[in-house]
Image (tube, helix red, strand yellow):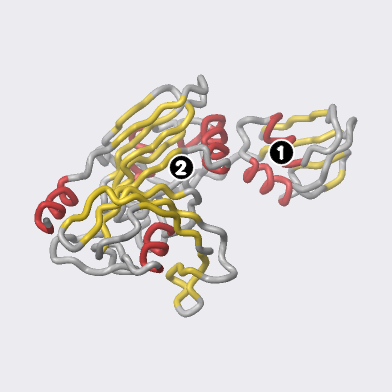
């Protein structure tokens, strides 16, 4: 249990923002959960996250201990592209889920990370320690992992402010023209199938930039830069404009050359929380996708 008390020195700042600034170990989302749970009070009274403070207000914060981790470390090899005292950049293989969920309670990236960093279970989210973003199970490529709460909060804010640069290599059926463009269409749960996402009028705003790298047979190899991070965004947007992802059995089309979707997180750029220096990492196409390109060509 940790307890803090602060006095607001200015008026007009939202409570959740104030808490995030005073306690860098807390992301704004975590702060909002604490407010909702009654663990943060203003002048001794419960408040809403959106409350705008007045100068002189006393903000009391109680951070309860995390429940014991229900995750089990598993020795699964990790392809570590970069590591420092605060974070890892991991090249995730296809077929490995990022964190446990119904249907795959173990053998995930999180289980592998806990084996590599045993202390992370006590310092992070009890179910998703160190995870600040995710890739679908059958998507390969670069993924960030935080080693401590301060770093996790910093990286989460970078993702929230859309300052993280992400690029994917994607192969779609058909020759996409024009050779560069932007797809803007709101995404939400498919009203006909709640297990899928779809372009829907009342969904959340979503924006995807694309560029044709080259045409491969009757297909297009694209570089994709999602400006937002909606669930299945790339696959849903490309299917919606009539250029489905090859190998994607949910939104795209099957291919005899692929056993999974042709979707690879190839570039990742962000600011190192420790210094603020911008860094960028790249991952080449894994062998199965490189081989599919050769076969299709």
Left or right: where 110 falls relative to 123? left
Disc 1 versus disc 2: nearer the observer: 1
Answer left or right for 123 relative to 225: right
Residue sitting at 37 percent across and 50 percent down?
Answer: 224
Q: Position of residue 240 (x, y in %)?
A: 40, 68
Question: Which residue is found at the position 11% from the left and 56% from the top?
Answer: 297
Taking depth in this image into account, of 197 and 3 the one nearest to the observer is: 197
Name the residue that disc number 1 marks.
Answer: 17
**Secondary-structure class at tag 2:** loop
Q: CA distance from mark 1 to mark 2?
A: 21 Å
Of residues 4 and 90, the one nearer the viewer is 90
Using the image, tell me which numbered label, if any, was put on residue 131.
2
Res 141 → quadrant: top left
Instruction: Rate crowding at label 1 as few (under 14), some (14 to 19) or many (20 or more) other CA atoms within 10 Å.
Output: some
Residue 174 in which image quadrant: bottom left
Question: In this rendering, would 97 be left or right of 215?
Answer: right
Residue at the image position 72 percent from the left and 32 percent from the top = 3
């Amino acid at each position: 249990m940790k307890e803090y008390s602060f006095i607001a020195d200015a008026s007009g700042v939202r409570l959740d923002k104030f808490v995030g600034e005073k306690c860098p170990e807390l992301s704004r989302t975590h702060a909002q959960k604490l407010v909702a749970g009654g663990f943060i009070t203003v002048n001794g009274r419960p408040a809403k996250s959106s409350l705008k403070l007045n100068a002189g207000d006393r903000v009391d914060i109680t951070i309860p201990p995390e429940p014991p981790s229900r995750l089990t470390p598993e020795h699964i090899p990790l392809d570590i592209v970069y590591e420092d005292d605060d974070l890892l950049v991991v090249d995730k293989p296809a077929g490995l889920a990022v964190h446990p969920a119904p249907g795959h309670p173990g053998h995930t990236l999180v289980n592998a990370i806990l084996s590599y960093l045993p202390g992370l279970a006590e310092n992070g989210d009890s179910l998703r320690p160190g995870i600040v973003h995710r890739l679908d199970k059958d998507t390969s490529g670069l993924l960030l992992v935080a080693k401590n709460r301060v770093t996790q909060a910093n990286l989460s804010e970078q993702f929230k402010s859309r300052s993280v640069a992400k690029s994917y290599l994607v192969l779609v059926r058909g020759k996409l023209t024009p050779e560069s463009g932007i797809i803007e269409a709101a995404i939400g749960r498919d009203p006909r199938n709640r297990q899928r996402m779809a372009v829907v009028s009342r969904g959340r705003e979503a924006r995807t930039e694309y560029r044709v790298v080259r045409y491969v047979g009757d297909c297009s190899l694209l570089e994709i830069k999602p400006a937002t991070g909606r669930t299945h965004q790339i696959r849903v947007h490309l299917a919606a404009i009539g250029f489905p992802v090859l190998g994607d059995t949910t939104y795209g089309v099957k291919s005899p050359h692929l056993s999974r979707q042709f979707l690879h997180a190839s570039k990742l750029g962000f600011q190192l929380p420790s210094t603020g220096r911008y860094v960028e990492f790249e991952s080449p196409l894994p062998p199965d996708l490189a081989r599919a390109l050769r076969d299709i060509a």
